[in-house]
Image: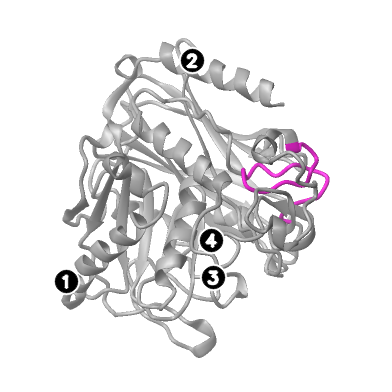
């Protein structure tokens, strides 16, 4: 399987070498907004709107996604030639919701949004979703005419941005945008200081500290009417910028928002590849979804670790390595290999971290002291205790008794940083 992956990577590199950004795109961003509607077993994707945004900050050389991560994937084709000219994997809050008890008896609609370089000519956007066997199946397609005068050409929510950490041209850097949530106008100075503090947190960890010169961090001065965030179980409701809330999916610590298009509106005020939302609260919580957004409390004593843990979800698609959470049901079927790079069901372990395991280490690996500092295959992960395995006995993706990423996770993060910066 590793040989197959190597061949696929070479194929993607070859395609990327053949696609010249200036042949198909201008240096701006096209945002494609849509809706997910359905219940546990159904989904309809429907078109909402197109938005023309500022400078394209994503890679101009690596236009074809080489990883294949995410529960969803979108492809962009040039209509005239039918050439694939851009692709990207992502996940959604909707897909997570479908694994909850509520989805069995309720129809809901969630907002969705993807971005791509702004095309010169007509393109076809195709959105795929993984089926029960983790194969991508096309769910939706839409033809975009860049000359369509219904494309929104304005800053929907204009705010000033500022540089938190700047290394150079956004097109060759990993650009992270910090969005304030629950900071009033009078608290913008606090937000600036929190941005500096959290940038420092990021660069305390490997492999970010070794790649500081490949990363830009931006802040957006976007105040809320009230300070804090919603805590429904305590009947606390705040008028905030992006309508965040604890108790997402009735999990107290899951701090998220369903108002994804407002998140995009605010993020558009700076170049960005990743969105991180900083919530002005001391209550423990956070959340993140791959190539969607990441979020954390800022004033809790564990905020540093929550931030770094959640950002690894959003940036690199890393999964939770703990096995004791009943929020989700059947998130990782044991007869299918997870797409997340730091979990395995042993269905296709050759495609994961098998090459990092020292000879003599048993597979699966018992939780004995002699193996606790080694790469292995430890049972328990992906919210279940049995049938799903993680690379190490402990890491920051498992519990905060560890304060570092294991080598498997470090390698993945490094590849993602290289993708944005090379």
| Residue at x 56% of width, y 22% of height | 9
| Residue at x 40% of width, y 21% of height | 122
Task: Name the one closer to the observer, 251 or 8.
Answer: 8
Query: Relative to 362, is 179 on the left or the right?
Result: left
Which quarter shows the N terminus?
A: top right
Image: magenta residue range = 331-349
Residue 379 sits in quarter:
bottom right
In this rendering, which labeled residue sits more in front, label 4 or label 1? 4
Mark number displayed over residue 189: 1
Residue 416 sits in quarter:
top left
Quickly name the residue at label 2: 15
Instruction: Measure the alpha-carbon separation of dots 3 and 4.
Output: 17 Å
Q: Which type of secondary structure does the marked residue at label 2 adopt?
A: helix
Instruction: Measure the alpha-carbon separation of dots 1 and 3.
Output: 27 Å
The answer to whether any part of residue 58 appears in the image is yes
The overriding secondary structure of the stretch rendered in magenta is loop
Task: Name the one closer to the observer, 214 or 281.
Answer: 214
Q: Compared to 404, does 239 lie above or below?
A: below
Query: Relative to 396, is 147 on the left or the right?
Result: left
Q: How far from the left and from the top, in percent, is residue 27?
A: 25, 28
405 part of magenta stretch: no
342 part of magenta stretch: yes
Task: Count neighbours of disc 4 (C-alpha within 10 A) and say few if under 14, some if 14 to 19, many if 20 or more.
Answer: many
For the residues bearing labels 2 and 3, Cβ distance under 8 angstroms: no
For the residues bearing labels 3 and 4, Cβ distance under 8 angstroms: no
Q: Compared to 167, does 108 lie above or below?
A: below
Q: How far from the left and from the top, in percent, is residue 226?
A: 29, 80
Quickly name the residue at label 3: 254
Q: First in sequence, mark 2 or 3: give its number.
A: 2
């Amino acid at each position: 399987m590793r040989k197959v992956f190597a061949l696929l990577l070479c194929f993607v590199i070859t395609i990327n070498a053949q696609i010249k950004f200036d042949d198909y795109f201008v240096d701006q961003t096209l945002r494609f907004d849509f809706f997910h509607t359905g219940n546990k077993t159904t989904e309809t994707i429907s078109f909402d709107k197109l938005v023309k945004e500022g400078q394209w900050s994503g890679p101009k050389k690596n236009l074809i996604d080489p990883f294949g991560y995410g529960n969803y994937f979108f492809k962009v084709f040039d209509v005239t030639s039918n050439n694939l000219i851009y692709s990207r994997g992502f996940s959604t809050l909707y897909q997570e919701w479908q694994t909850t008890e509520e989805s069995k008896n309720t129809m809901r609609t969630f907002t969705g949004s993807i971005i791509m370089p702004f095309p010169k000519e007509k393109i076809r956007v195709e959105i795929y979703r993984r089926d029960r066997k983790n194969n991508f199946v096309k769910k939706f397609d839409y033809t975009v005419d860049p000359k369509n005068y219904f494309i929104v050409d304005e800053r929907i929510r204009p705010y000033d941005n500022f540089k938190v950490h700047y290394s150079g041209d956004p097109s060759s850097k990993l650009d992270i945008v910090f969005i304030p949530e629950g900071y009033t106008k009078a608290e913008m100075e606090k937000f600036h200081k929190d941005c500096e503090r959290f940038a420092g947190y990021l660069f305390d960890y490997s492999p970010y500290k070794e790649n500081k010169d490949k990363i830009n961090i931006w802040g957006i001065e976007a105040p809320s009417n009230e300070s804090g965030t919603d805590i429904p179980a305590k009947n606390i409701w705040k008028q905030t910028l992006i309508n965040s809330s604890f108790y997402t999916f009735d999990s107290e610590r899951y701090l998220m928002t369903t108002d994804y298009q407002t998140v995009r509106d605010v993020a558009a005020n700076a170049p960005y590849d990743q969105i991180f939302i900083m919530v002005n609260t001391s209550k423990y919580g956070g959340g993140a979804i791959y190539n969607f957004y990441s979020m954390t409390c800022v004033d809790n004593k564990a905020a540093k670790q929550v931030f770094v843990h959640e950002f690894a979800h959003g940036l690199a698609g890393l999964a939770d390595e703990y096995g004791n959470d009943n929020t989700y049901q059947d998130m990782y079927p044991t007869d299918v290999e997870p797409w997340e790079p730091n979990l395995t069901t042993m269905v296709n372990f050759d495609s994961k971290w098998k090459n990092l395991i020292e000879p003599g280490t048993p597979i699966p690996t018992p939780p004995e002291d002699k193996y606790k500092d080694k790469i292995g295959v430890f049972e328990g992960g992906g919210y279940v205790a049995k049938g799903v395995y993680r690379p190490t006995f402990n890491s920051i993706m498992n519990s905060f008794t560890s304060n570092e990423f294991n080598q498997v996770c470090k390698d993945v993060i490094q590849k993602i940083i290289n993708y944005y910066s090379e």
